[in-house]
């Protein structure tokens, strides 16, 4: 039996959103070293502000300015900062209720160690040297022993020159993926340009890619079965929107992505169809895999192309549509 594989995996995408009037004023205010909150119907000042009252769900736009100083309400020490966190050295995550606010803001506190942090300690904002209209305009909080800010926030129009109207937030997840015994065997076989599934001992269906257990019967699977490599297009879609540039998605549109029932398999897998005009792809089209290159980069077929065989009869694949 082949060894179980593992590999680092990164899921990453930029999340883009537009801002309403309240969020726009808040982030633009940070750019101008001004912290804005919003007053709810019961008089509570929320920082950071929201656009709807969390109690009544009514829209709220009563903006007020609060002080850049505040009090730590709770905290947790971070001994090993990760990539893109606010500070590169150990720091504390803190909830800070700014003077004049009724709620707490989450951010980082620059402190020499956990012994220097306590609930109730006074802190102030350390502004970033370069500010663009984002929460990172607050570089962090730092200990503060000066005079407290005004306890009563002052009204603010929320109007600034060149307001921030949208933000782009990069979302990223780094982890090590271990596919398990069944899929490790499947991936290892693909290196030899073979496609291997597993047969359920109860219903006798062959699943590709194998999952280690039958999704219908719930019993473990172990019997390996080589399928394909040819198969039948069961259904498909035409992609008209170009994906962001990555190593394997920089494709000219339109192109076709299809579910393909490999010969001998009882579950359709997906793959790109090429070697035929996109508007000639059809259900029942017989296709075969095309590997490009060698080594790890050729572990999966690059695409599937027509075999030239007559189309499969619908009754032969209707259960897999």
Image (tube, rainbow, N blue to C red):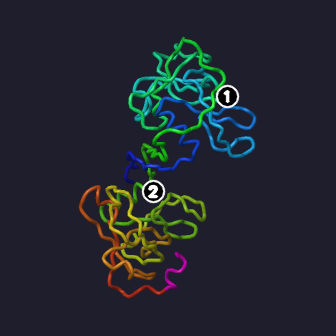
Residue 104 lies in the magenta stretch: no
| Total labels drawn | 2
Residue 320 lies in the magenta stretch: yes
Q: Kindly identify the residue that appears in the image at 59 percent across and 19 percent down.
A: 149
Q: Which mark is residue 182?
A: 2
Secondary structure at numbered mark 2: helix
Q: Which residues are magenta?
A: 314-321
| In the rendered image, the vertical position of residue 226 relative to residue 77, given as above or below | below
Looking at the image, can residue 276 be seen? yes
Q: Position of residue 206 (x, y in %)?
A: 49, 69
Residue 287 located left or right of residue 139: left
Q: Which residue occupies the foreground of this view, 155 or 116?
A: 155
Looking at the image, can residue 171 be seen? no
Category of crowding for the residue at label 1, using alpha-carbon neighbours closer than 10 angstroms: few (below 14), some (14–19), many (at least 20) = some
Query: Which corner quadrant of the image does residue 131 belong to?
Result: top left
Mark in the foreground, 2 or 1: 1
């Amino acid at each position: 039996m082949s060894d179980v594989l593992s590999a680092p995996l990164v899921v990453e995408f930029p999340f883009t959103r537009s801002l309403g009037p309240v969020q726009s004023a808040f982030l633009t205010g940070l750019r101008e070293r001004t912290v804005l909150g919003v007053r709810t119907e019961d008089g509570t000042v929320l920082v950071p502000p929201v656009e709807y009252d969390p109690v009544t769900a009514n829209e709220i736009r009563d903006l007020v300015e609060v002080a850049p100083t505040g009090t730590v309400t709770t905290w947790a020490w971070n001994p090993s900062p990760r990539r893109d966190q606010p500070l590169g050295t150990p720091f504390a995550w803190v909830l800070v209720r700014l003077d004049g606010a009724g709620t707490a803001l989450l951010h980082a506190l620059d402190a020499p160690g956990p012994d220097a942090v306590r609930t109730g300690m006074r802190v102030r904002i350390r502004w970033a040297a370069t500010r663009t209209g984002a929460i990172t305009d607050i570089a962090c909080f730092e200990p503060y022993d000066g005079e407290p800010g005004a306890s009563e926030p002052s009204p603010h129009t929320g109007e600034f020159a060149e307001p921030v109207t949208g933000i782009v937030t990069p979302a990223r997840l780094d982890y090590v993926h271990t596919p398990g015994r069944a899929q490790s065997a499947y991936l290892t076989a693909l290196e030899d340009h073979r496609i291997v599934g597993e047969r359920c001992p109860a219903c006798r269906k062959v699943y590709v890619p194998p999952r280690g257990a039958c999704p219908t019967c719930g019993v473990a699977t172990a019997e390996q079965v080589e399928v394909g490599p040819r198969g039948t297009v069961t259904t498909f879609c035409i992609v008209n929107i170009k994906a962001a540039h990555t190593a394997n998605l920089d494709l000219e549109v339109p192109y076709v992505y299809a579910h393909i029932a490999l010969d001998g398999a009882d579950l359709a897998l997906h793959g790109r169809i090429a070697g035929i005009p996109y508007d000639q792809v059809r259900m029942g089209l017989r296709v075969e895999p095309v590997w490009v290159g060698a080594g790890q980069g050729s572990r999966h077929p690059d695409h599937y192309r027509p075999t030239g065989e007559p189309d499969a009869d619908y009754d032969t694949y209707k259960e897999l549509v």
